[in-house]
């Protein structure tokens, strides 16, 4: 992602997982947010499934709290702020988004936009929704309590992949 930033030509950066779809006119929504002085934001999350657990879990993405953040929700940040914070820490193979967003929360007014981004539920349905949410929750907690990137990666490889 850091390499992508070096090739980007805009001062506005938008990170999106390949299996996620943006809301209609997302670019206009981000421009409007920037005009309002928002330096960093994400969208609410919804899954492309009618699975009740996924629907319920996605509701938490509307809360503007670090524990409710993750890469599936996208990430908008201006280049100046991104660079000032040192970009994504290359030591983090997993939780790199959480690690960077943690820096954003401590530096600027992070905003959760009202519109929803739709992300694939395939992985959750294949691996088990409760099981996968449990392990992602453990990863969040481990990051929160300061576990290093190597331990996070080992946990991810052992329990998620």
Image (cartoon, rainbow, N blue to C red):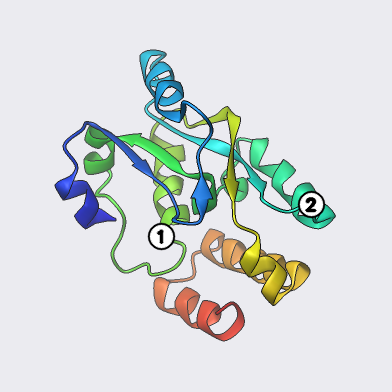
Question: Does 1 sit left or right of 19 as displayed?
Answer: left
| Earlier sequence position, callout 2 versus callout 1 | 2
Foreground pick, 100 / 22 = 22
Q: Position of residue 99 (x, y in %)?
A: 43, 55
Question: Does 96 sit left or right of 11 as displayed?
Answer: right
- Which image quadrant: the N terminus? bottom left
- Identify residue for label 1: 96
Q: Position of residue 123 (x, y in %)?
A: 62, 68
Q: Give me the residue at 64% from left, 65% from top.
A: 122
Q: Position of residue 11 (x, y in %)?
A: 22, 31
Q: Give me the residue at 45% from left, 54% from top.
A: 17
From this view, report whether residue 150 is shown above or below residue 95. below
From this view, report whether residue 35 is shown above or below residue 130. above
The disc label shown at residue 78, or none: none
Estimate how packed mark 2 is, as few (under 14), some (14 to 19) or many (20 or more) residues with alpha carbons within 10 Å: few
Secondary structure beneath disc 1?
helix
The disc label shown at residue 50, or none: 2
Q: Give me the residue at 68% from left, 76% from top.
A: 127
Question: Does 91 sit left or right of 103 as displayed?
Answer: left
Residue 70 visible? The answer is no
**In the orientation shown, which residue stands out farthest toward the right?**
52
Residue 7 visible? The answer is yes
């Amino acid at each position: 992602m850091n390499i992508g930033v070096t090739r980007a030509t805009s001062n506005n950066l938008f990170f999106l997982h390949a299996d996620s779809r943006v809301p209609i006119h997302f670019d206009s929504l981000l421009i409007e947010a920037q005009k309002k002085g928002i330096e960093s934001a994400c969208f609410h999350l919804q899954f492309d499934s009618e699975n009740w657990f996924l629907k319920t879990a996605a509701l938490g993405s509307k809360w503007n709290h670090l524990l409710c953040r993750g890469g599936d929700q996208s990430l908008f940040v201006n280049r100046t702020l991104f660079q000032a914070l040192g970009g994504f820490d290359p030591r983090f193979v997993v939780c790199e988004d959480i690690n960077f967003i943690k820096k954003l929360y401590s530096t600027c007014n992070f905003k959760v936009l009202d519109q929803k981004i739709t992300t694939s539920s395939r992985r959750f349905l294949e691996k088990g929704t409760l099981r996968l949410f449990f392990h992602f929750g453990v990863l969040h907690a481990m990051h929160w309590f300061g576990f290093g990137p190597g331990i996070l990666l080992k946990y991810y490889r052992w329990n998620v992949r």
